[in-house]
């Protein structure tokens, strides 16, 4: 079964960690043996494993956070954030020129791409990438939205951890900044999709109030199951359902297991069943399977040590259909969750 994954930090891993994603996960692990940084030697994502797992489409990020108002490690200016994200976009473009991947900008391209994968997945067609921005700091001003659209950007979130140019994000309390509404208006006008992941609660509600276009949560779980501001309340999930949005279940262990302590709690306490718990919770709130999907965030600053223990590489996402079937989901519902809901949302948006 083909899969659409709505959140992978591929360019960040390639450029920041110097990972050659055309090599296998196992070769990358071998090359990183002995490196002390978090997640080194424990990656789960590379192009061969994406093809083996039939990840036909992913929402591939460009990511560069401004340091001001955010935790250390960001860029010191909007211009540097812009240039960093453009460099990540260049990585995707050169891979597209080599037929490794296909950047998807419109419905006709996506429709043809999915049909190619459904008919001939075993012959390794190009991987499909929808370009997404995690945190809008690389957009220097709302007036630059049109330029990013021409570059292929189709989905953007407003913030990450801390406070961005446009909104309060994870770990902060507050709403949109003075530039937040003008940015959302510019995104609305051009047809860009809003990703509400990582928004603080106030920013979330304010963004949905003033943005009229399509919305999604690329990688978010349920606060009812795992407490914490990074997850969504049932009220927030219901608002997304009312907007015909889709929530991609994330696989970072601390978002799956209450009380998880990074670098202390072993991942043996978390399995893919926990991911299905969050998918099922969204479906129960909706009363159907039309609003839950996958947004794994695998290798999003961590490796296999911080994701479900029964997932070795991204190819193991193919275990999830059987888990859903064991919960009573029929074939049609499983298809919706694995890829169909993202197709519907993109079709309606484009």
Image (tube, rainbow, N blue to C red):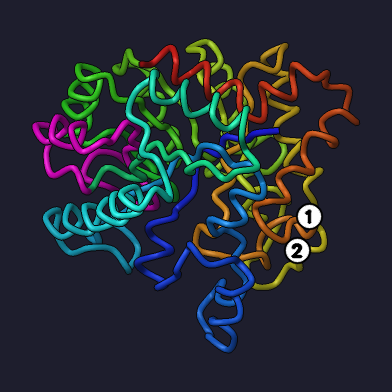
* Residue 119 to residue 32: above or below: above
Query: In the figure, is residue 20 to the left or right of 307?
Result: left
Query: In the figure, is residue 170 to the left or right of 321?
Result: left
* Residue 254 to residue 346: above or below: below
Q: Nearer the viewer, residue 63 or 321?
A: 321
Q: Which residues are magenta?
A: 138-167
Secondary element at image label 2: helix
Residue shown at 51% from the left, 57% from the top: 300
Residue shown at 48% from the left, 18% from the top: 345
Q: Which residue is mark 2?
A: 267
* Residue 140 to residue 28: above or below: above
Q: Quadrant of residue 180?
A: top left
Q: Position of residue 265 (x, y in %)?
A: 73, 67
Give the CA separation, mark 1 to mark 2: 5 Å
| Residue 156 falls within the magenta-colored stretch | yes
Decide: few, some or many residues near mark 1? Use Cα within 10 Å; few <14, some 14-19, many ≥20. Answer: many
Q: Nearer the viewer, residue 297 or 116?
A: 116
Residue shown at 88% from the left, 22% from the top: 328
- Report the disc number at residue 246: none
Query: In the figure, is residue 24 to the left or right of 215?
Result: right
Q: Are marks 1 and 2 in contact (CB under 8 Å)?
A: yes
- Report whether residue 69 is seen: no
Q: Position of residue 152 (x, y in %)?
A: 26, 35
Q: Which residue is mark 1?
A: 270
- Report whether residue 345 is seen: yes
Residue shown at 74% from the left, 42% from the top: 318
* Residue 126 to residue 15: above or below: above
Q: Nearer the viewer, residue 347 or 191?
A: 347
Secondary element at image label 1: loop
The quarter of the picture where the C terminus appears is top left
Query: In the figure, is residue 169 to the left or right of 287?
Result: left
């Amino acid at each position: 079964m083909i899969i659409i994954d709505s959140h992978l930090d591929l360019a960040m891993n390639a450029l920041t960690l110097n990972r050659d994603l055309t090599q296998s996960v196992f070769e990358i692990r071998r090359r990183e043996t002995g490196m002390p940084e978090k997640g080194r030697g424990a990656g789960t994502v590379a192009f061969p494993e994406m093809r083996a797992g039939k990840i036909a489409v992913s929402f591939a990020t460009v990511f560069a956070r401004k340091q001001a108002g955010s935790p250390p490690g960001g860029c010191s200016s909007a211009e540097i954030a812009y240039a960093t994200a453009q460099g990540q976009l260049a990585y995707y473009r050169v891979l597209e020129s080599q037929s490794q991947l296909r950047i998807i900008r419109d419905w006709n391209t996506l429709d043809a791409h999915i049909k190619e994968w459904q008919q001939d997945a075993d012959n390794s067609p190009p991987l499909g990438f929808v370009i997404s921005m995690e945190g809008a700091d690389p957009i220097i001003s709302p007036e630059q939205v049109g330029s990013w659209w021409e570059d292929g950007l189709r989905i953007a979130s407003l913030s990450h951890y801390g406070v961005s140019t446009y909104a309060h994000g994870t770990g902060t309390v507050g709403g949109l900044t003075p530039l937040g509404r003008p940015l959302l208006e510019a995104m609305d006008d051009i047809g860009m999709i809003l990703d509400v992941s990582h928004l603080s609660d106030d920013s979330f509600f304010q963004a949905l109030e003033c943005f009229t276009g399509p919305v999604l949560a690329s990688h978010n779980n349920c606060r009812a199951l795992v407490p914490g501001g990074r997850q969504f309340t049932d009220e927030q999930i219901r608002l997304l359902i009312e907007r015909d949005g889709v929530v991609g279940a994330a696989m970072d262990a601390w978002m799956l297991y209450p009380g998880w302590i990074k670098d202390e709690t072993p991942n043996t306490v978390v399995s893919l069943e926990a991911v299905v718990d969050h998918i099922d919770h969204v479906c129960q709130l909706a009363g159907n399977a039309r609003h839950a999907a996958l947004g794994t965030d695998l290798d999003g600053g961590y490796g296999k040590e911080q994701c479900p223990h029964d997932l070795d590489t991204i190819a193991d996402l193919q275990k999830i259909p059987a888990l859903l079937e064991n919960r009573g989901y029929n074939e049609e519902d499983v298809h919706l969750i694995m890829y169909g809901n993202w197709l519907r949302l993109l079709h309606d948006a484009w």
